[in-house]
Each structure stands twice: as structure tokens, then as C-alpha cells.
């Protein structure tokens, strides 16, 4: 009624005088209640502010990643995409000498792919196959769009070195060349360069490896004595790029070093307890995203996180390492050519989502190196004296 003062009050006025919606006055809060309420609001504020901080972190990391629209560049003339849950990723190591990489030597006409691996994730996402393609492999390179400023189309090249595809047409041409060689459609593309790789290893705190023999290579300025090592970024880069310090000095020995290092790196990531160390987790995420160039379907933190979630159950022992079956070129011992029948076995296994059969690599030049007796990763059993920082760690420019 209009004559009752409380009936005409608004809800805001009642709240201001401490009156509940029912019309009853609140009991005064005790000191403990006030403290608890303040704590609750403080916690809520922390969550809100934390969410804002995470939003900033997400935005920052998202902005680190460089993306390339491979699908738009290649169009529809590609191998059939098999939607069975498996995934194929072309992982490249670029040897560009631009920017921070200039100290590793002079560009010989442009960046090339120093490392190329096709990573096949099986449909259950519990195993992976890695097929390394030697950079010195002679192939028929398909036509690729060259430098946009030139606006020219590169004609197919006979007996071209595999790593020239990246130099001619960048990531899109590298993907097109791998698809032409394998008949397997690449779902994604990932690339890291020298400086990014080095920073990644340093941020991780180094990678544990054992050298059963000394490795010395004046070209990569790598000098490792036999024993256990925590390799820093420069040393790790020198190790995965050395040719003359191991085996017969060819790219085939270097590939097996890269494969051994890749497994050791995975073990290291799994053992450092990233999720219990938020700062290291952020630093590693910041470094990793800054080092990456991906296809446009992976160029966000959300997309990369989804990929990481898919791969989290795969450990180093779940990965089968294979080098594309090759033989030395009779006309040039510094080059290799694919063993067609055996290479076909490799790619057939990938398409069928099966492990690569041992028969596919038997007799391949890449299967005859002794690198397995030279290095191995460490999984916590250090069984001997460990050295840290052994050697100069300065990576040079092995060709």
C-alpha cells in the first residue's frame, strides 16, 4: 500500500538499508563472515585477472607463429586425403642464413631444407612413423610457383636435389615435391630454422645424450668426447648438422644423428615436469611458437594445442625411424637416388597406416651406417661421468 514506506521501496533502496527481498532486515555480519566474503571476492578477482593474463599470453603466443596457406598455393591437384584419423606432417629444418642465422655461413642462392621428415601419426594416435628424406636425393621436382615478384612458373626439373624444392618455391613447393615423391597427402607443415632450434634447446635446459665415440667436425665446430653430455643449443645444432664427424661423411649418417636426437629431445620434454613449472612452460611455449612456421591450419595456439593433445600419449619408444631407401648415384657419389621398389613399400605402409616393414630398408645405403653405435639418448640412467658444455658448441656451415 502507498501508506507503507517499505512497500514503495525499490530493491536497491532495501539493499542499501540491509533489508532482504523478503522485507526482513539482515543480521549484522560477524568479523569472520566479512573476512570470508572478502576472501571470496579476492579469489574471484584473481580468477578474472588470471583469465585476462591467460588471454594476453594466448594472444602473445598466437602472434608468434608464422603461417603459410599451403592449401591455397597447391589447389586441388594433390593426393587423395584419407579421413581415417591418421595424420601426415612434413617437418622441415630450414638452413636460411638470414638474420640471426647469418653466422652459420653465406646463402648459396637462398634457403634450402637442411632436414626433411614425414611424420605419420597412426589413426589410434598411439604410434608414429618418421621417414627422413635425404637432402641430397636426386628426384624429378614438379613445377612450382617461384618468387611472387618474378611471377614465373618453374618447370619440372630432372635429377634435381630434393632440398632445392624449398629454395625454388618455399614451403608449398616442398610439400608438393614430397607429395609427388610419396603419393601421400600432407595434412600439415611445420618448419624451424637454426636460431629457433638453438633457442628451443637452451630454453628446455639442454638435451641429455651419450656419445660412445668422440665426434669432431671442424666444419660444424663440434668437439664432443665420448661420454654423457647435456647438449646446449649450439652443440645440439652442431650435432644434428654434422656430416664429416660421423660415418662416411654423407647426409645419411647425419640423418641418423637427427633421428637419435629427436628421440632424446622427446624424452627430455617428458622428464622436465613442465606443468609443475609455469614459468618454464611459458618460456618454452614462447620460444617454440616464435621458432615455428606452419601451414595456416596450424598457425594458432589453439590448433597447436590440439595437435599436442593428440600426440601426448606417444613416447620415443612408440616412434619408428626410417630413412627413405636409397643408393649412391653411380654418376655422382655425393648424391643418392631412391630405390624405387623399396621406397614404394615405405609409402604403401604409410598409406595403409601400418609400420614400415624391415624389408623396405634392407640393402639401403641409409641402413648401413654405424650411427647407432655412436650416440644414444639418456633416459635417466646416467651410468657414467656426465659432461656439460663440452666442446666449443659453435655450429658452422657443413654442406
Image (cartoon, grey):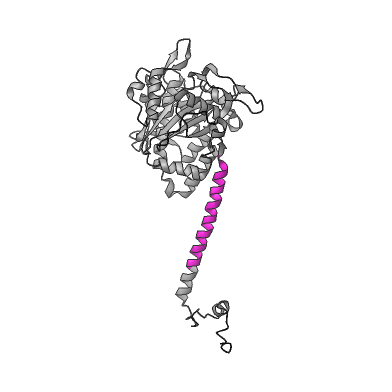
Could you say which quadrant of the image residue 168 lies in?
top right
Q: Nearer the viewer, residue 70 or 293?
A: 70
Could you say which quadrant of the image residue 390 lies in?
top left
Q: Nearer the viewer, residue 314 or 178?
A: 178
Q: Which residue extends farthest top?
A: 331
Q: Is residue 86 visible?
A: yes
Instruction: Please report the residue visible at 48 percent of the width from the left and 10 percent of the height from the top.
Output: 331
Q: Which residue extends farthest right?
A: 149
- The prevailing secondary structure element of the residues shown in magenta is helix
Q: Is residue 316 left or right of residue 149?
A: left
Q: Is residue 323 left or right of residue 21?
A: left
Give the image location of residue 337, x and y in percent.
45, 16
Give the image location of residue 202, x and y in percent.
49, 38
- For residue 40: magenta? yes
Measured along the vertical axis of the image, is residue 32 above or below residue 42? below
Give the image location of residue 291, x and y in percent.
53, 37
- The magenta segment is 39-65
Q: Nearer the viewer, residue 331 or 6?
A: 6
Q: Quadrant of the N terminus?
A: bottom right
Instruction: Please report the residue visible at 46 percent of the width from the left and 40 percent of the height from the top.
Output: 204
Q: Nearer the viewer, residue 358 or 243?
A: 358
- For residue 323: magenta? no
Q: Is residue 369 visible?
A: no
Q: Is residue 396 left or right of residue 340?
A: right
Number of on-image labels: 0
Give the image location of residue 50, x and y in percent.
51, 56
Instruction: Please report the residue visible at 38 percent of the width from the left and 26 percent of the height from the top.
Output: 348
Amino acid at each position: 500500500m502507498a501508506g507503507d514506506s517499505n512497500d514503495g521501496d525499490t530493491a536497491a533502496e532495501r539493499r542499501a538499508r540491509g533489508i532482504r527481498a523478503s522485507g526482513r532486515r539482515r543480521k549484522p555480519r560477524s568479523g569472520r563472515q566479512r573476512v570470508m566474503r572478502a576472501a571470496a571476492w579476492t579469489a574471484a578477482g584473481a580468477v578474472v585477472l588470471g583469465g585476462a593474463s591467460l588471454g594476453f599470453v594466448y594472444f602473445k603466443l598466437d602472434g608468434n607463429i608464422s603461417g603459410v596457406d599451403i592449401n591455397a598455393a597447391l589447389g586441388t591437384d594433390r593426393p587423395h586425403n584419407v579421413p581415417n584419423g591418421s595424420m601426415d606432417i612434413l617437418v622441415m629444418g630450414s638452413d636460411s642464413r638470414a638474420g640471426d642465422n647469418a653466422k652459420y655461413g653465406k646463402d648459396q642462392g637462398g634457403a634450402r631444407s637442411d632436414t626433411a621428415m614425414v611424420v605419420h601419426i597412426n589413426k589410434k594416435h598411439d604410434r608414429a612413423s618418421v621417414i627422413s628424406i635425404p637432402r641430397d636425393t636426386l628426384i624429378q621436382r614438379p613445377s612450382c610457383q617461384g618468387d611472387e615478384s618474378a611471377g614465373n612458373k618453374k618447370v619440372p626439373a630432372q635429377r634435381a636435389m630434393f632440398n632445392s624444392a624449398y629454395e625454388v618455391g618455399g614451403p608449398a613447393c616442398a610439400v608438393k615435391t614430397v607429395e609427388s615423391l610419396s603419393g601421400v597427402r600432407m595434412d600439415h607443415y611445420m618448419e624451424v630454422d637454426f636460431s629457433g632450434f638453438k633457442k628451443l634447446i637452451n630454453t628446455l635446459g639442454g638435451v641429455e645424450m651419450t656419445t660412445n665415440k668422440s665426434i669432431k667436425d671442424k666444419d660444424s665446430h663440434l668437439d664432443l668426447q665420448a661420454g654423457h653430455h647435456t647438449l646446449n643449443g649450439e652443440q645440439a645444432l652442431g650435432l644434428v648438422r654434422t656430416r664429416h664427424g660421423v660415418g662416411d661423411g654423407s647426409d645419411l649418417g647425419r640423418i641418423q644423428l637427427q633421428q637419435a636426437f629427436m628421440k632424446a629431445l622427446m624424452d627430455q620434454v617428458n622428464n622436465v615436469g613442465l606443468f609443475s613449472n609455469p614459468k618454464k612452460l611459458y618460456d618454452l611455449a614462447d620460444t617454440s611458437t616464435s621458432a615455428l612456421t606452419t601451414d595456416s591450419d596450424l598457425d594458432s595456439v589453439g590448433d597447436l594445442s590440439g595437435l599436442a593433445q593428440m600426440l601426448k600419449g606417444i613416447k620415443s619408444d612408440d616412434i619408428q625411424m626410417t630413412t627413405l631407401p636409397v643408393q649412391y648415384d653411380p654418376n655422382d657419389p655425393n648424391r643418392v637416388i631412391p630405390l624405387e621398389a623399396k621406397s614404394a613399400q615405405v609409402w604403401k605402409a604409410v598409406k595403409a597406416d601400418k609400420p614400415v616393414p624391415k624389408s623396405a630398408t634392407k640393402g639401403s645405403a641409409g641402413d648401413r651406417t654405424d650411427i647407432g653405435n655412436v650416440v644414444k639418448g639418456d633416459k635417466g640412467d646416467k651410468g657414467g661421468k656426465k659432461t656439460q658444455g663440452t666442446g666449443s658448441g659453435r655450429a658452422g656451415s657443413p654442406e
